[in-house]
């Protein structure tokens, strides 16, 4: 959820519905605000320059990923913005628990193959005690076989 949305959000209804609450952050002030809501995860971005959408913030960089992770402790941290498969190991090493990716897949010459590469990478970087972070590709829809 974006910072501009959280103040009007019915957080108790979100929790009652069993949904996970994730809040985007781009500055220290936004992180302080987000932590007041005790989110299930926090997002930080853009980590690198991104073409997906115009961002009023400068790229955060890996040092900021590490800083955020130190501040939020066990709350999962999702890194977003300009992250490619090649950059991902450094993002995980810096402290991200999750990575949100768009352009690296949508701009790939073989998006399906790129997704499989991401799945393999992500599953090798997730802690064993966090099975909720493990990913699998969806099985084919049986209706497609007809």
Image (tube, rainbow, N blue to C red):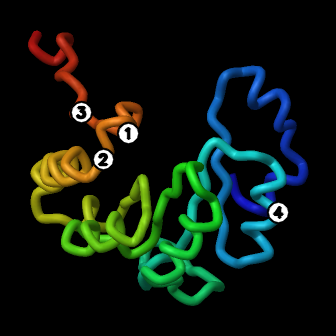
Tag 4 and tag 3, C-beta contact below 8 Å: no
- Which residue is under mark 3? 136
CA gap between label 3 and label 1 equals 10 Å
- Residue 63 image position (x, y, % from top left): 47, 83
Q: Which of 107 and 84 is in front in this view?
A: 84
In this rendering, would 9 be left or right of 79?
Answer: right
Q: How many angstroms separate mark 2 from mark 3 (CA)? A: 13 Å
Q: Residues within 10 Å of mark 2 (few under 14, many from 20)?
A: some
Task: Choose mark 4 or mark 3, whichever is in front.
Answer: 4
Label 2: which residue? 126
Q: In this view, does 31 lie above or below 132?
A: below
For residue 77, above or below residue 83: above
Observer-nearest of 146 and 53:
53
Of mark 2 and mark 3, the one earlier in the sequence is 2
Query: Would you place residue 135 above or below residue 49 in this image?
Result: above
Please tell me whether mark 4 sits on a helix, a strand or a loop.
helix
Q: Residue at x 19, y 22 (%)?
A: 139
Q: Earlier in the sequence, mark 2 or mark 4?
A: 4
- The residue depicted at 43 percent of the width and 61 percent of the height is 96
Query: Is 124 left, or right, of 82 in this rendering?
Result: left
**Real-space Cα distance between discs 2 and 4?**
28 Å
Q: What element carries label 1?
A: helix
Quarter of image, res 57:
bottom right
Q: Is residue 8 left or right of residue 74?
A: right
* Residue wearing tag 1: 133
Q: Is residue 69 left or right of residue 50?
A: right
| Residue 35 rendering spot, x and y as whole percentages | 76, 56
Q: Are marks 2 and 1 in contact (CB under 8 Å)?
A: yes
């Amino acid at each position: 959820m974006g910072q501009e949305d959280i103040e009007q959000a019915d957080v108790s209804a979100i929790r009652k519905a069993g949904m996970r609450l994730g809040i985007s952050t781009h500055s220290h002030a936004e992180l302080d605000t987000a932590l007041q809501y005790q989110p299930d995860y926090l997002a930080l971005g853009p980590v690198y320059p991104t073409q997906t959408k115009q961002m009023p913030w400068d790229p955060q960089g890996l040092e900021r990923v590490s800083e955020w992770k130190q501040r939020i402790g066990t709350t999962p941290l999702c890194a977003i913005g300009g992250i490619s498969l090649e950059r991902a190991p450094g993002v995980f090493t810096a402290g991200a628990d999750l990575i949100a990716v768009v352009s690296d897949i949508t701009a790939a010459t073989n998006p399906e193959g790129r997704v499989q590469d991401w799945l393999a990478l992500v599953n090798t970087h997730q802690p064993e005690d966090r099975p909720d972070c493990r990913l699998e590709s969806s099985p084919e829809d049986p209706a497609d076989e007809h």
